[in-house]
Every structure is written in C-alpha cells, then in structure tokens.
Amino acid sequence: ACLRAHPRVKKLFSPGLEDHPGHAVASRQMRRFGGMVSFEHEGDVQVANRFAASTRLFTCAESLGGVESLLDHPASMTHAVVPREDRLKSGFRDGLLRLSVGIEDEADLLQDLAQALEKAFA
C-alpha cells in the first residue's frame, strides 16, 4: 500500500496484486505470494541511486533471496552492461527497483521505503 499509494510510483509489480498479469497462476500455485516486489518510479537513474542510498534496512545486492531485505536497481546493477535501448525494450526502465523483503518488522520496512522515496525526490 505504501508504494502503490505514493504519487511518484508509476507501477507496482507483484503476483499478489489482483491486477498483476500472473495473479491467477500465482493464486493456484502459491498459498502466499512471497516477498519479491518490483516498482517503477517516475525518476531517472540518479533518483534510483538516491533511493538506494537512502534506505536503512534494505541492502543493495544482486542476489535477491536471503532473510534480510535486499534491493536491486537493474539499470545500475544486474543489467548495467546491457545497452539502455535494449534494457528499455525488455522493460527494464531506469526507475525500476526490485525488492526482496526479508524478516524485518513490516512497519519498519514500510517506513524505510517511504522515507527513502521522499529523500530520492527531494
């Protein structure tokens, strides 16, 4: 809800959301939808980098799947070697961020995301 309601977030991607294209399949295959969430903000690479630098509980990492909350910015991390035009064709826009939500307190994580978004666009 924190990300979906934020005015600077353009899209939120999670199979747990009813409007996600894979929701029906995920609903049949999963009891819960897991902690992988991606979102796209309206900013550029610099905004994404400010966001990543502003988080307190999310660690930047290219490996998503530990018990700690992790953050990946594909344009500057996992897909940095891919030419921008090719990334864009594949849907990896400059404002795309991927989150692997860990076992930290939910309220703390949401507050961290909210404050990082505010700092990123300040």
Image (cartoon, grey):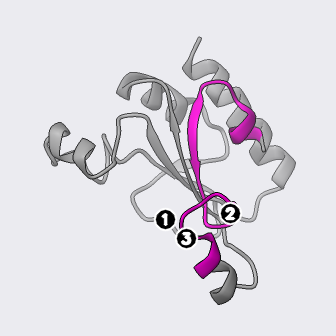
Does 102 sit left or right of 73 as displayed?
right
Going by the numbered disc 2, the residue's amino acid type is Gly
Question: Is label 2 in a helix, a strand or a loop?
Answer: loop
Going by the numbered disc 1, the residue's amino acid type is Leu
For discs 2 and 3, the disc positioned in front in the rendered view:
3
The answer to whether one can see residue 112 in this image is no
Classify the position of the C terminus by image quarter: top right
C-alpha span from label 2 to label 3: 22 Å
Pointer 1 residue: 64
Q: Earlier in the sequence, mark 3 or mark 1?
A: 3
- Give how far across and how far down residue 25 sits, in percent: 59, 81
- Is residue 118 depicted above or below 76 in this figure? above
Furthest toward the top, the residue is: 122
Q: Assess disc 1: are there few (<14), some (14-19) or many (≥20) residues with their C-alpha within 10 Å of its C-alpha.
A: some
Task: Name the residue rendered at 70%, 30% in the picture.
Answer: 6
Q: Earlier in the sequence, mark 2 or mark 3?
A: 3
Pointer 2 residue: 102
Going by the numbered disc 3, the residue's amino acid type is Gly
- Residues at badges 1 and 2 in contact (C-beta under 8 Å)? no
The answer to whether one can see residue 53 in this image is yes
Task: Name the residue rendered at 69%, 60% in the picture.
Answer: 17
C-alpha span from label 1 to label 2: 10 Å
Q: Assess disc 3: are there few (<14), some (14-19) or many (≥20) residues with their C-alpha within 10 Å of its C-alpha.
A: some
Q: Does the magenta portion include 21?
A: yes
- Is residue 94 depicted above or below 90 in this figure? above
- Give how far across and how far down residue 50 sits, in percent: 49, 25
Pointer 3 residue: 22
Q: Which residues are magenta?
A: 2-25
Task: Name the residue rendered at 30%, 54% in the picture.
Answer: 78
Q: Assess disc 2: are there few (<14), some (14-19) or many (≥20) residues with their C-alpha within 10 Å of its C-alpha.
A: many
Image quadrant assignment for residue 10: top right
For discs 3 and 1, the disc positioned in front in the rendered view:
3
